[in-house]
Image (tube, rainbow, N blue to C red):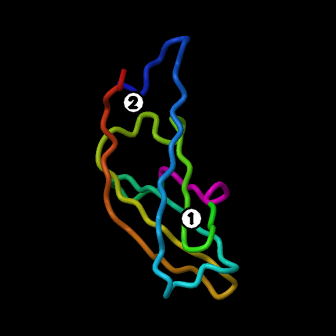
């Protein structure tokens, strides 16, 4: 019942979610965090250290280890942090579909 096949020749999936942030939001000197929460509002994915900011683009790398066993609907948030504090600049829902593309 895992999202990814459990056999010896397992394929590693890697992809990125890319956010284009409006120019009104200053990203210089800030860090970003992409988090995923389950239906009980528990954080199940925390992508802080590997999330990058370049200009007005925030890139969140994800792989099979991040989403393994998480089939279903989840809530996400995108935060930026500076010495002045943390602000949520995006949130929404997405669905991890349990299907192997061959």
* Mark 2 or mark 1, earlier in chain: 2
Residue 47: x and y in percent read: 57, 55
Residue 99 to residue 33: above or below:
above
Q: Is residue 61 magenta?
A: no
Is 23 displayed left or right of 84 in the figure?
A: left
At horizontal 54% and vertical 55% (from top left) the residue drawn is 60
Q: What span is in magenta? A: 44-51
Identify the residue at horizontal 64%, vertical 71% (top origin). 31
Q: Quadrant of the N terminus?
A: top left
Residue positioned most to the top? 8
Q: Tag on residue 33? A: 1
- The residue labelled by disc 2 is 3
Residue nearest the observer in this picture, 9 or 21 = 21
CA–CA distance in space, label 2 to label 1: 24 Å
Above or below, 42 against 27 in this view is above
**Would you call the spot at circle 1 few (<14 residues within 10 Å), some (14-19), or many (20 or more)?**
many
Pick whichever, 59 or 97, lies toward us.
59
Q: For this view, does 28 lie left or right of residue 93? A: right
Residue 77 relative to residue 40: left or right: right
Q: Quadrant of residue 101?
A: top left
Residue 34 location (% of width, % of height):
51, 61
Question: Mark 2 and 1 residues: CB-CB less than 8 Å, in contact?
Answer: no
Q: Quadrant of the C terminus?
A: top left
Between 35 and 56, the residue placed more toward the observer is 56
The numbered disc on residue 82 is: none
Instruction: Say if the magenta span includes residue 46.
Output: yes
């Amino acid at each position: 019942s895992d999202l990814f096949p459990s056999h010896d020749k397992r394929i590693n999936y890697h992809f990125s979610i890319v956010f284009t942030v409006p120019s009104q939001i200053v990203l210089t000197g800030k860090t970003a965090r992409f988090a995923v929460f389950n239906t009980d509002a528990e954080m199940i994915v925390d992508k802080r250290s590997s999330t990058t900011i370049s200009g007005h683009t925030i890139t969140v790398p994800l792989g099979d280890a991040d989403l393994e066993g998480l089939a279903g609907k989840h809530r996400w948030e995108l935060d930026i942090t500076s010495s002045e504090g943390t602000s949520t600049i995006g949130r929404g829902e997405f669905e991890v579909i349990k299907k192997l593309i061959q």
